[in-house]
Amino acid sequence: MTDKRRIGLIGAGLMGHGIGKNILQHGYALSVLAHKNREPIDHLVSLGAQEVASATAVAAASDIVILCVTGSPQVEAVTLGVNGLLAGIQPGMVLVDCSTAEPASTAKVAAAVTAAGGRFIDAPMVRTPKEAEAGKLALMTGGDKATLEEIRPVLTCFADTLIYAGGVGAAHKLKLINNFIGLGAAAVAAEGIAAAANGGVEMQALRDVVMAGGSNSVMFERLMTVLLEGDESVFKFAINNAQKDLRYYTTMTQEAPVTSFIAESVHQTYVLAGNLGYGERYVPKLVDMLAQINPPTAEAETP
């Protein structure tokens, strides 16, 4: 290992743990920010990571800092807030934001990082915690191409696909569009599955006919896998996070302005699920939520 660049990681959760693990396995020095969820932090420390107490300390110890937090409020707090990254930033340090964020906030954070002597790359992710652990995430990237090439060896520790979207903020826009399409497909599939359950349609028959034709989608397959096989590992994404991503998307389209009639309906489906107590559950629980408000008809219940 000849690359001596030091890496910092803030946000060692479902996705971030896999990122950190793969960076360590490729021989890089890694600093991680202390977190209330001790399990992933303790595991990374056992693999050789150094735990530090503040974002400022992460920046001071790192040449590249990777953020993997919930959304724009968290990105701004950890970057611009008290004991934030800006207070410890080193000249030329690269901040890589793998979070799903609002493009307007991204522009604000990137400007502050640049003014402090650092560099900014937005690199939101697709795929699941399973791929994060395997080092096979896909990243959309936005920012200076030369900087991206410089840090590519670090990004490829945990991602096997890098797609360039354009300048700073372009990747976060692309991520919101991608998530709207995916979460919209999941909401449509859940509504269809709930209608089938309401009408007494055999679930295996529904799965077979949809997967045999043009209505099939990855999201439909994931929902049916959870429903029929009980395997939640194929779609570990919380409804609250989905609601947040869709709100970011509708805010972006409003600011453009671009019409987004369907997105507003999809967003409200996830809002309803959250209001009914499903917010911390994974997206496939949309089926349960819709079944709750659309119980089977008397005819469907008749043997």
Image (tube, grey):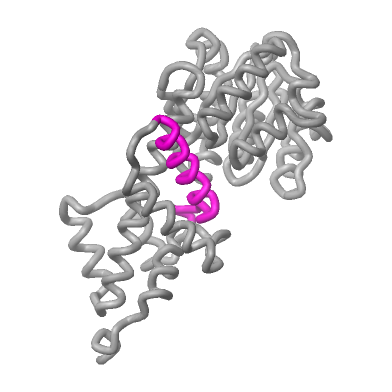
* Residue at the bottom extreme, as displayed: 303
The part of the chain drawn in magenta is 233-256
Residue ID at (44%, 32%): 255
Percent of width and height locating residue 217? 28, 50
Percent of width and height locating residue 29? 72, 23
Front residue of 133/200: it is 200
Q: Is residue 135 above or below residue 276?
A: above
Q: Is residue 142 above or below residue 283?
A: above
Residue ID at (43%, 75%): 292
Front residue of 257/132: it is 257
* Majority secondary structure of magenta residues: helix
Does the magenta portion include 167?
A: no
Quadrant where the C terminus sits is bottom left
Percent of width and height locating residue 181? 35, 43
Quadrant where the N terminus sits is top right
Q: Is residue 126 left or right of residue 77?
A: left
* Residue at the left extreme, as displayed: 213
Q: Is residue 266 above or below residue 3?
A: below
Percent of width and height locating residue 110? 60, 20
